[in-house]
Image: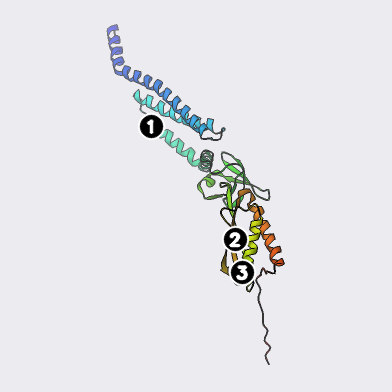
Amino acid sequence: MNAEEIIEQITQMSLLYGPKLLGAIAVWIIGGWIVKGIGSAFKSTLSKSKTDPSLIPFLTGIVNGLLKVMLVITVLGMLGIEMTSFIAILGAAGLAVGMALSGTLQNFAGGVMILIFKPFKVGDVLQAQGYTGSVAEIQIFNTIMKTPDNKTIIIPNGGLSTSSMVNYSTEAKRRVDWTIGVAYGDDLDKAREVIKRLCDEDSRILKDPAVFIAVSALADSSVNFAVRAWVNAPDYWGVHFDLNEKVYKTFAAEGLNIPFPQMDVHLHKDS
């Protein structure tokens, strides 16, 4: 092969692959800028949304890594390299890893969702997964709760993020409900007046909305009053327990009876 043939082949290869190579280089450079811009925008969005600071670098790294893999696949495809087999192998490997770590990945994804959308925060009182307690710590795989009797409950984030929960700390006000029984034959108006007076005397019970008092049921052994009052959330249990005690003591002083279930047994003697 003489010099002219070599030059001719180089020229033909340049004409054939040159545009592809230049295009791939241009896509690589421009794509790199775009990936960097998307990564910065994603990081800024997470920061503005008050996402957990320890989670931001991790999520940003995942997004940047995925975008760079997509960029590499695009550039290699532009160069004429067959990527079908490579993508198939990569997908199969990802599927195998995902199946092996399905539970862990579910908990990880749940932790990410909790940290991003914040359905609860540290210090909130939750009822979830059959437990009630205050949130002590939110980790990437688990949430740590403390029960009122100081037990530590570790709940996986996967189930916590996909199941129903009750957050008692979301609202500033809560309604306290009581069922107060009065004996049949007692003065219902007087009982209502006593309950209303006790509620009015407690400064922790809010005036608006007003206290609701009504006969809710004619039970087997008592006439039951439904009492509903609104309080600031931190005062909930204090008001609940205090009114129970005040009703018991005041009813006795006012001549009102709090009945309890009882049964009369009559014995008949055969003559």
Q: Earlier in the sequence, mark 1 or mark 3?
A: 1
Q: Residue furthest bottom?
A: 271
Determine which residue is flagged by label 1.
85
Circle 3: element type: helix
Report the residue at 66% width, 73% height from top.
262
Please state which of residues 229 and 220 is positioned toward the viewer in this rendering: 229
Please tell me the numbered disc located at residue 188: 3
Amino acid type of the residue that numbered disc 2 sits on in the rendered structure:
Val
| Quadrant in the picture for residue 154 | top right
Determine whether label 2 and label 1 are within 8 Å by CB. no
Foreground mark, 2 or 3? 3
For label 2, the residue is 227
Q: Is residue 171 left or right of residue 83?
A: right
Indicate the amino acid at tag 3. Leu
In space, the residues marked 1 and 3 are separated at their CA atoms by: 83 Å
What's the CA distance linking mark 2 and mark 1? Answer: 71 Å
Vertical placement of 60 versus 225: above or below?
Answer: above
